[in-house]
Image (cartoon, rainbow, N blue to C red):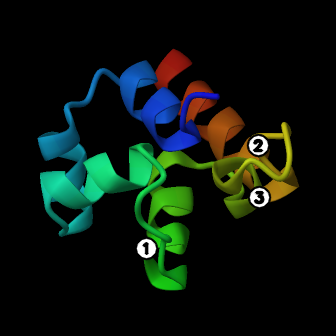
Amino acid sequence: MESRVKELRLARRLSQEMLGQSLGITQQTISKIENGKYDIPTDLLISLSNFFNVTTDYILGLSDIKRNLEGQIRVNKTLDDNYD
């Protein structure tokens, strides 16, 4: 199974380096996360969740539901703002 972090990163067309820079971590850390060789610390998990606007459970593979109600409301607001 492909890493959810990798899936989300590729969907946004980000390199590992670009994602790492956005989160204040190294490309190597992103690579280790995507390859399952690094246990994501809680603070980084929350940062990834906020960055991609998905639940932590989705990133960890515990759920296939990407967004809770709050996350979906943010997506809808962004779409509305950009559509108008």
Could you say which disc has been placed on residue 30 in the image? none
Question: Which badge, 2 or 1, comes first in the chain's sequence?
Answer: 1
Callout 3 crowding tier (Cα within 10 Å): few <14, some 14–19, many ≥20: some
Question: Residue 37 placed where, x, y %?
Answer: 41, 58
Q: Which residue is mark 2?
A: 72
Label 1, secondary structure: give it.
Answer: helix
Determine whether 54 is above or below 14 in the image: below
Amino acid on which the number 2 mark rests in the picture: Gln
Residue at the spot 48% in from the left edge and 71% down from the top edge: 40
Determine whether 45 is above or below 30 in the image: below
Side of 50 where 62 appears, left or right: right
Question: Residue 66 placed where, x, y %?
Answer: 75, 40
Q: Which residue is mark 1?
A: 44
Callout 1 crowding tier (Cα within 10 Å): few <14, some 14–19, many ≥20: few
Mark 2–mark 1 contact, CB under 8 Å? no
Residue at the spot 86% in from the left edge and 47% down from the top edge: 63
Residue at the spot 77% in from the left edge and 58% down from the top edge: 57
Mark 1–mark 3 contact, CB under 8 Å? no
Side of 73 where 2 appears, left or right: left
The span from disc 1 to disc 3 (Cα, nearest Å) is: 13 Å
